[in-house]
Image (spheres, rainbow, N blue to C red):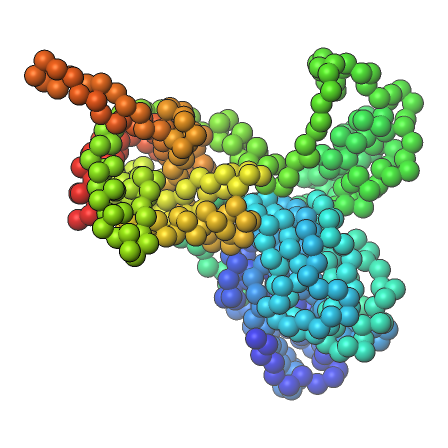
């Protein structure tokens, strides 16, 4: 929805709209949602409270509401008609780059706000990117299949009038990033007056995302990141470009500046570059780093954004979190009987509970009994959550993702079962929305269906615990009367962050969890 107040032509010559959301509120900050719109004239002044003051009463600022995670820059110039530049948004807190899977609209098509514009593969999933503006698609800068696109890179241009589409046929992207992401490369406005920003204060979410978003990238050559130079300095290049350069024997220092963000060298910059002297390709049977490689045939699978993120986060977890592990054996006969009875009783209503549904409920209830396990390490404090949002590990075929059952302690078994089926289906189809897999408080990973009896899991930061669930097996026990009885047992292992959860606390959590499984009717109270 677009709200405007009357603006005279002289005040409309230059204004910028910058946006980045996960919601529709107007705030400011790198982690929260934000929307700012500004009009600029020579007499405009910024009010300390964030509201623009204008000498001319007829020139007033206006605010716009847009779908979340969108970067827009709208420009006016004598050479080009009114248009809106749409940049790659950050669709998850950990997203640094994205891949254009496909475009659902083509140049010249009419687009309405909310229409599916294109599909973008992030570090978490493949998501649909909705059109942020009504109008006509005038120019596409990155075709389907384009990879490793930095946040803020220009994707397309939308114009309000169909007759203006042809005027952008020869428009070229200068490679700079659209403002609004905290990047140093500012989008140059073609008008004569600089735009002023109207900023509102930001609210802080009570629960952090699963990982802290990356800090704004400093400028090339700045203190935090330096561009490539001669003299043996390390070249500023993407991992893919470094790999290709090593394979082709290219000296990256001979490329003054790349076409990527902040001058990063990309694989595109290596096209047509010849191998450098003294940097011959490694011989067959050896690998970079001096380590021998197998002589047989092999194939390399290209890393997806999701796989890169999984590798980065799990490596970080093992390096930074002091893990310890507690294992307990649970008797499952009573739970299996209750599950069978419920499924038979409600068969006509198509309710079919799984063992995993009971496990999720037991995890949530045990976490309410021992809230220290439903906490997170925040460096300066330990954050204890008041509701238990259970992250359920799901294998999508291309990687692992953890959709969330929010406030699982308040939900019935049938509701949990329905949510798990729905979220698992969306996860495997790559259609999960960010709020459906970000922000859990404790994780459960079940490999029992694959015949695994026991394993340990890596903690999902910033959570403090993850439960690894094995399969159910039969085990012989003495019956107390000189004989033996066979029971169904299941091993579970709780991985704990020792900074947050002491050993005795983790043991108490497992004690409650075991009781809920062995006396499952208590979960129904």
Q: Position of residue 95 (x, y in %)?
A: 60, 47
Q: Where is residue 30 in the image (x, y as percent from the top left)?
A: 56, 53
Q: Is residue 293 above or below residue 369?
A: above
* Picture residue at 45% right of the left edge, 36% below the top: 460
Residue nearest the observer in this picture, 437 or 359 = 359
Q: Is residue 381 above or below residue 167?
A: above
Residue nearest the observer in this picture, 36 or 252 = 252
Identify the image quadrant of residue 325: top left
Q: Is residue 391 left or right of residue 76?
A: left
* Picture residue at 71% right of the left edge, 64% below the top: 105
* Picture residue at 28% right of the left edge, 23% below the top: 474
Residue nearest the observer in this picture, 254 or 515 = 515
Q: Position of residue 394 (x, y in %)?
A: 46, 40
Is residue 246 in sight in this rendering? yes
* Picture residue at 67% right of the left edge, 55% below the top: 88
Q: Is residue 278 above or below residue 143?
A: above
Q: In this view, does 256 lie to the left or right of 119?
A: right
Q: Report the label total.
A: 0
Identify the image quadrant of residue 179: bottom right
Identify the image quadrant of residue 67: bottom right
Q: In this view, does 340 lie above or below 5?
A: above
Q: Position of residue 69 (x, y in %)?
A: 58, 59
Q: Is residue 69 left or right of residue 80?
A: left
The N terminus sits in image quarter = bottom right
Is residue 496 in sight in this rendering? no
Residue nearest the observer in this picture, 89 or 47 = 89
Q: Is residue 61 left or right of residue 24?
A: right
């Amino acid at each position: 929805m677009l709200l405007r107040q009357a603006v005279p032509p002289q005040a409309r010559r230059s204004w910028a709209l910058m946006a980045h959301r996960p919601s529709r509120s107007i705030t400011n900050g790198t982690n929260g949602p934000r929307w700012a719109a500004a009009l600029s004239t020579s007499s405009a002044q910024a009010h300390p409270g964030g509201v623009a003051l204008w000498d001319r009463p007829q020139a007033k600022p206006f605010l716009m509401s847009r779908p979340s995670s969108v970067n827009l820059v709208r420009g006016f110039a004598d050479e080009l008609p009114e248009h809106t530049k749409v940049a790659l948004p950050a669709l998850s807190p950990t997203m640094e780059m994205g891949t254009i899977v496909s475009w659902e609209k083509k140049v010249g098509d009419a687009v309405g706000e909310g229409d599916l514009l294109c599909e973008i593969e992030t570090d978490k999933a493949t998501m649909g990117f909705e059109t942020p503006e009504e109008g006509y698609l005038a120019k596409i800068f990155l075709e389907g299949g384009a990879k490793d696109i930095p946040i803020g890179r220009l994707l397309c241009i939308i114009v309000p009038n169909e007759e203006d589409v042809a005027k952008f046929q020869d428009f070229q992207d200068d490679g700079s990033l659209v403002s609004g992401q905290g990047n140093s490369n500012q989008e140059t406005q073609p008008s004569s007056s600089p735009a002023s920003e109207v900023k509102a204060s930001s609210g802080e979410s009570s629960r952090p995302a699963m990982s802290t978003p990356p800090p704004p990238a400093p400028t090339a050559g700045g203190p935090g990141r330096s561009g490539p130079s001669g003299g043996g300095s390390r070249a500023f290049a993407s991992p893919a470009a470094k790999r290709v350069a090593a394979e082709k024997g290219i000296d990256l220092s001979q490329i003054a500046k790349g076409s990527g963000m902040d001058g990063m060298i990309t694989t595109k910059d290596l096209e047509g570059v010849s191998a450098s002297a003294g940097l011959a390709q490694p011989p067959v049977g050896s690998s970079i780093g001096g380590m021998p490689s197998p002589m047989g045939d092999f194939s390399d699978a290209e890393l997806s954004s999701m796989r890169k993120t999984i590798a980065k986060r799990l490596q970080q977890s093992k390096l930074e979190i002091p893990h310890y592990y507690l294992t307990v054996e649970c008797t499952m006969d009573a739970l299996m009987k209750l599950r069978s009875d419920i499924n038979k009783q409600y068969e006509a209503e198509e309710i079919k509970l799984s063992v995993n549904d009971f496990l999720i409920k037991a995890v949530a209830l045990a976490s309410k009994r021992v809230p220290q396990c439903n906490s997170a390490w925040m460096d300066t404090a330990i954050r204890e959550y008041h509701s238990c949002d259970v992250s359920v590990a799901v294998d999508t075929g291309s990687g692992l993702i953890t959709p969330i059952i929010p406030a699982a302690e308040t939900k019935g078994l049938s509701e949990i079962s329905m949510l798990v089926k729905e979220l698992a289906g969306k996860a495997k189809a790559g259609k999960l929305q960010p709020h459906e897999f970000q922000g859990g408080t404790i994780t459960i990973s079940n490999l029992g269906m694959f015949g695994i009896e026991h394993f340990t899991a890596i903690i999902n930061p910033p959570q403090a615990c993850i439960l690894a669930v094995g399969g159910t097996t039969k085990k012989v026990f003495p019956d107390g009367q000189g004989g033996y009885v066979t029971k169904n047992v299941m091993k579970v292992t709780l991985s704990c962050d020792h900074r947050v959860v002491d050993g005795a606390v983790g043991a108490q959590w497992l004690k409650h969890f075991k009781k809920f499984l062995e006396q499952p009717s208590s979960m129904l109270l």
